[in-house]
Image (cartoon, rainbow, N blue to C red):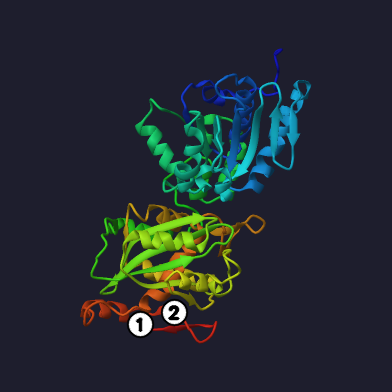
């Protein structure tokens, strides 16, 4: 094949990225540094040059948190830089968000991580996961890495910080510990010189200090702006209440669910003892029927108490012949109790109060804790302020399930004959926001 020229000249700051020879790479970049353009061109070059007779039909992927995001961010770049390759038969497919090279059968395609199960069973020779701070961590272990295994494909991860407790933050820590296996690049705006100083000064004026440090200085320790539970999670960490929390066989295990029909279902497993909420486990999956989740419950080996689910479980089907989830679970030997409809604001308020008496098992609840840590309010770009409603993303299901836990755990009868006096004295000093079960209107009540 004759020499093919792609109309791309890498920025000097990305030369090290393009030239490294490690299987795993990660780039943490300030906004508008050009990381997505660099990823698209790395994928194109890899597809064009792939030539291994033992690995026919090479396949490469760009993954964004959402397919719509991949289309908006990356498709224009992919189509533009590949447009000059039509002389070798390159064929774009807008419906699949893919391009195909007939000379070696290679494909580059864009995907969204919100439907990660669509990647299961596929192989890839290389994957670029962009905006990884907004991709669920479990997606890496259960979907992305298995897709690379048999062909020993490479993995490229990029993003902008949003705290340490997410896929991007955890992989940066791993790359720092294992420099022989990982290429690690961190581009801060004050050092990269990609954006003019005058523009950075303007951005600094328009943003809070935490926002600027996070978005432009790649500061993982900057507070997640708009975090719903930020203050309460910080309090948990400072008091060492994210630790080892063992299952107590003398107490029943209760569950609180958020049900996803086309996306994720999340389940918290907890025990209540003398006013403490001991959260011992968490499970989440997507595109699975109720039989799958009942099997998960049965496989845990816990002695169960109450299973609380959202009100729409009375009507939602999750397949299985049109029967409601409640009826399906009942036929499998499990009673799911629907929670009356309430507002998201009430769930959040109940969640904040409940976090004050929670203990979490650090290992088994890790993915659920990631949801709570990164659950944030939606930002209104026009008004330059956060909305009253949280952003709906991968964190929503685990956070909503925790909200249902928070609204119902007080209904559970306490273990033992009576509560310790100091606990009730502590609780009676608080005016806890608690929904009125007889209507949709909230009311103030003491526990």
Q: Nearer the viewer, residue 183 or 444?
A: 183
Q: Which mark is residue 380?
A: none
Q: Quadrant of residue 178?
A: top left
The image shows residue 119 at horizontal and vertical percentages of 57, 43
Task: Judge left or right: residue 296 versus residue 440.
Answer: left
Q: Nearer the viewer, residue 429 or 236?
A: 236
Q: Are marks 1 and 2 in contact (CB under 8 Å)?
A: yes
Separation of disc 1 and disc 2 at Cα? 9 Å
The image shows residue 439 at horizontal and vertical percentages of 53, 85
The image shows residue 363 at horizontal and vertical percentages of 33, 52
Residue identified by numbered label 2: 434
Q: Earlier in the sequence, mark 1 or mark 2?
A: 2
Placement of 352 over or under 69, stated as above or below: below
Seen from this angle, which residue lies furthest right? 87
Q: Quadrant of the N terminus?
A: top right
Q: What residue is shown at x 70% (from left), y 13% (from top)? A: 3
> How many neighbours does mark 1 have within 10 angstroms: few (below 14), some (14-19), or many (20 or more)?
few
Q: What residue is shown at x 38% (from left), y 28% (from top)? A: 179
Which secondary structure lies at badge 2? strand
Placement of 382 over or under 146, stated as above or below: below
Placement of 322 over or under 36, stated as above or below: below
Q: What residue is shown at x 55% (from left), y 82% (from top)? A: 440
Seen from this angle, which residue lies furthest bottom? 438
The image shows residue 254 at horizontal and vertical percentages of 36, 70
Which secondary structure lies at badge 1? loop
Say if residue 416 shows up in the picture: yes
Q: Which mark is residue 447?
A: 1
> How many neighbours does mark 2 have within 10 angstroms: few (below 14), some (14-19), or many (20 or more)?
many
């Amino acid at each position: 094949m004759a020499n093919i020229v792609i109309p791309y000249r890498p920025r000097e700051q990305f030369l090290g990225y393009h030239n490294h020879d490690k299987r795993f790479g990660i780039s943490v970049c300030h906004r508008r540094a050009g990381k997505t353009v660099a990823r698209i061109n790395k994928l194109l070059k890899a597809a064009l040059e792939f030539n291994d007779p033992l690995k026919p039909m090479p396949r490469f992927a760009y993954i964004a948190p959402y397919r719509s995001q991949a289309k908006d961010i990356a498709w224009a770049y992919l189509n533009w830089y590949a447009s000059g390759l039509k002389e070798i038969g390159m064929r774009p497919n807008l419906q699949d968000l893919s391009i195909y090279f007939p000379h070696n059968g290679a494909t580059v395609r864009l995907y969204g991580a919100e439907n990660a199960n669509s990647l299961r069973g596929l192989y890839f020779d290389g994957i670029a996961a962009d905006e990884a701070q907004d991709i669920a961590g479990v997606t890496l272990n259960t979907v992305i890495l298995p897709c690379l295994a048999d062909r020993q494909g490479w993995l490229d991860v990029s993003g902008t910080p949003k705290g340490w407790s997410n896929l991007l933050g955890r992989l940066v820590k791993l790359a720092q510990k294992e420099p022989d296996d990982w290429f690690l690049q961190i581009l801060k705006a004050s050092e990269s010189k990609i954006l003019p100083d005058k523009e950075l000064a303007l951005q600094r004026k328009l943003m809070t200090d935490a926002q600027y440090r996070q978005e432009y200085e790649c500061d993982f320790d900057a507070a997640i702006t708009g975090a719903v539970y930020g203050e309460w999670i910080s309090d948990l960490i400072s008091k060492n209440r994210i630790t080892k929390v063992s299952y107590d066989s003398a107490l029943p295990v209760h569950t609180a669910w958020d049900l996803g029909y086309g996306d994720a279902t999340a389940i918290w497993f907890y025990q209540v003892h003398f006013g403490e909420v001991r959260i011992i486990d968490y499970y989440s999956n997507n595109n699975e029927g109720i039989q799958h989740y009942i099997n998960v419950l049965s496989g845990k080996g816990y002695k169960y108490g109450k299973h609380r689910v959202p009100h729409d479980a009375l009507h939602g089907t999750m397949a299985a012949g049109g029967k409601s989830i409640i009826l399906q679970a009942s036929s499998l030997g499990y009673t799911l109790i629907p929670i009356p409809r309430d507002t998201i604001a009430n769930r959040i308020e109940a969640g904040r109060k409940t976090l004050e008496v929670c203990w979490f098992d650090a290992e088994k609840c890790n993915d659920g804790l990631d949801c709570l840590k990164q659950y944030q309010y939606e930002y209104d770009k026009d008004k330059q302020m956060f909305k009253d409603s949280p952003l709906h993303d991968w964190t929503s299901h685990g956070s909503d399930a925790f909200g249902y836990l928070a609204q119902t755990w007080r209904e559970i009868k306490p273990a033992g004959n009576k509560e310790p006096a100091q606990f009730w004295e502590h609780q009676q000093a608080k005016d806890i926001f608690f929904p009125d079960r007889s209507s949709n209107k909230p009311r103030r009540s003491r526990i």
